[in-house]
Image: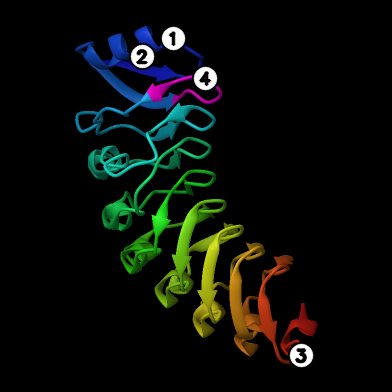
Amino acid sequence: MESLLLHWRISAAAFWLLLCTTGITLVACSMPGNSFTGDVPSFQEMSNLQWFILIENYLGSGQANDLDFPCSLTNCTYLRYLDIGENNFGEAVPKFIGNLSITLYELVLQVNALSGAIPSSIANLINLERLELLDLAKNKLAGAIPPEIMSLSSLSIYANFSDYNLAGELPREIENLKNLGHLHLFGNRLSGEIPNTLGSSISLEYLYMQGNMFTGPIPLTLSSH
């Protein structure tokens, strides 16, 4: 089987031709900054895929079934980077997102039209070896931040939940994010007191919480950073 590493910009016609070509093992599919539209096909047969980058296109319709294709990516047991941000994908974050490869380093869904609540099934990512970046910013998500998402001890470097309609209190389970360096929560409707357990995030260097409805004192535990 021929191995193909794809990192250049190609036309839509060449993209479809590639998918129909037999005898190819696709390892990396990186096509940011094009003008692709419509639905993304299934990648069920691309089990060796490690990079899947489609950021900055016009994919999706902003409606249901836009995110059927990531289900096929659960067969990609070596997947490391999934970035489909800055498109027009709609519907809720699919529950099977928690069944992605345990080798996943980056999951980027930011700047789309995703709606509904963040599924608690995302906690299934707890088995990840190292999730360096989780970005769900600038969607239409609502509801509370699931405590399960704060139990992802493998989450390190960067987490972005900013600029949508999240409400409720910040989960105390945030203390589990001991390796996290950046936490973005601004532009939501989060309320209540900031939990003292935030001080247990010993690697935290950048904390953005502006534009919320937090009350009470600033935790003294933050002074240890």
Looking at the rendered structure, the secondary structure element under dot 2 is helix
In the rendered image, residue 55, in percent from the top left (x then y), is placed at: 51, 33
Q: Disc 2 residue type?
A: Phe
Q: CA distance from mark 4 to mark 2?
A: 12 Å
Give the mark nearer the N terminus: 3 vs 2.
2
In the rendered image, residue 84, in percent from the top left (x then y), is placed at: 45, 38
Give the mark nearer the N terminus: 4 vs 1.
1
Q: CA distance from mark 3 to mark 1?
A: 55 Å
Determine the main secondary structure of the stretch shown in magenta. Answer: loop
Residue ranking furthest to the right: 223
Q: Which residue is mark 4?
A: 34
Q: Which mark is residue 15?
A: 2
Residue beneath the point at 46% across and 65% down = 142
Foreground: 85 or 23?
A: 85
Q: Which residue is mark 3?
A: 220
Q: CA distance from mark 4 to mark 1?
A: 8 Å
Q: Which mark is residue 218?
A: none
